Image (tube, rainbow, N blue to C red):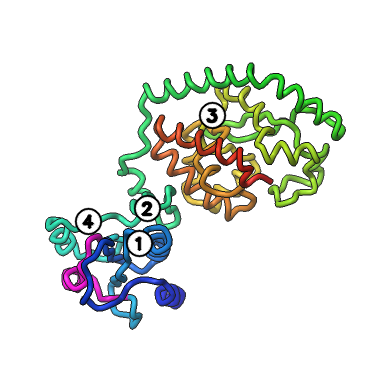
Amino acid sequence: MMQQQTELTTLSISSDKPAFLKGLKKRVLIVGIGLLAMELSKTLVSNRRTVEVVGFLDRGLNGNPRVLGTYDNLREIVERYQVGMIAVCVEDRREVLPVQALLDCKTVGIEVIDGHQMYEDELGRLSIDQLRPSALIFSTGFKRRALTTALKRGIDIVIALVGMVILFPLCALIALLIKVDSPGAVFYRQMRVGLRGQPFMIWKFRSMYQDAEKSGPRWAENHDPRVSRVGRVLRKLRLDEVPQLYNVLRGEMSLVGPRPERPVFVEELRKTIPYYDIRHTVRPGVTGWAQTKFRYGSSAEDSHTKLQYDLYYVKNVTFGLDVRILIETARVVLLGEGAR
């Protein structure tokens, strides 16, 4: 609680008294003071110029100036601060919410939104640490329409075939450069975890020196000494991933989806990260939502954040989102962002 109070006092939110309350910004009241409430507030303060966080409500008074009152004061606080939106970020299900007061606010036109949903809409990722299973079970996402699935697979096959034909001369040149640069095979195969948790061999151009993992598997790092000279260029331009078009053609991968992880890391991550296996309910992708929104994952902490983006994709997968990811991937590749 002391940490939460410290974070509350450091947030740049409005706590002015109600003399100048009307303006262009929508004023948001956050119900709750837990981790989700803190993360959402920081996000709104940093990302939204059209929203102003007026403060928080807690189940009891705790002396913090950013806590404007208790749940019993909801209607009074809404009127005093001219609140236009209420974000409910209560994490303890044993707490009794002011249901009638929230309903009254809703019926007079004030937005009442679940904190998890608002976090998802603002950041394009799911807040998984405080997410209850019921929020996933009863959500409107995770739809798998047969027509959409068939269309996605058809597009994967066509683009994989065309891509393999068009890129063949480039692949031949890359193969030659790899052989000249360092001894070893041109292609590198590695076990990954795919759809429904099934393992498969992923194909890549070799970008590391031979026997790079003789001491055991480990995360890639900045300026990784295991990466060859040619491999550094291939990774910068993401050209080492081109052979995965073969995996797409075989049905082991899709053009767009969560990036497949190695079994050794999957076993480690599923023990510590909630809902990790949900990412295996769709085909893994050559590129994905997390790759366009977050840096290269090189630790368990990075994987935790990337999973939030992966779950957003799995929940909201559409043809339009796939097109958006492919366009954004092209931008990332051209700028060489995030490679290691």
Q: Which residues are magenta?
A: 67-85
| Rendered location of residue 173, percent (x, y) | 76, 24
**Badge 3 amino acid:** Leu
First in sequence, mark 1 or 2: give its number.
1
**Badge 4 amino acid:** Glu
First in sequence, mark 4 or 1: give its number.
1
On residue 91, the disc is: 1
| Identity of the residue furthest to the bottom in this view | 63
Residue 218 to residue 174: above or below: below
Magenta-colored stretch includes residue 75? yes
Residue 178 to residue 127: above or below: above
Residue 149 to residue 197: above or below: above
First in sequence, mark 1 or 3: give its number.
1
Q: Are marks 1 and 3 in contact (CB under 8 Å)?
A: no
- Measure how far apart labels 1 and 2 are at the Cα level: 9 Å
The quarter holding residue 200 reads: top right
User: Of residues 167 and 33, which is closer to you in this image?
Assistant: 167
Say what secondary structure mark 3 lies in: strand
Circle 2 residue: 132
| Rendered location of residue 313, percent (x, y) | 44, 40
Say what secondary structure mark 4 lies in: strand
Horizontal side of residue 282 vs 44, given as left or right: right
Q: Are marks 3 and 4 in contact (CB under 8 Å)?
A: no
On residue 295, the disc is: none
Quarter in which the N terminus is drawn: bottom left
What crowding class fits label 3: few (fewer than 14 Cα within 10 Å), some (14-19), or many (20 or more)? many
| Rendered location of residue 74, percent (x, y) | 20, 69
Q: Are marks 3 and 2 in contact (CB under 8 Å)?
A: no
**Badge 2 amino acid:** Arg
Circle 3 residue: 255
| Rendered location of residue 82, percent (x, y) | 20, 68
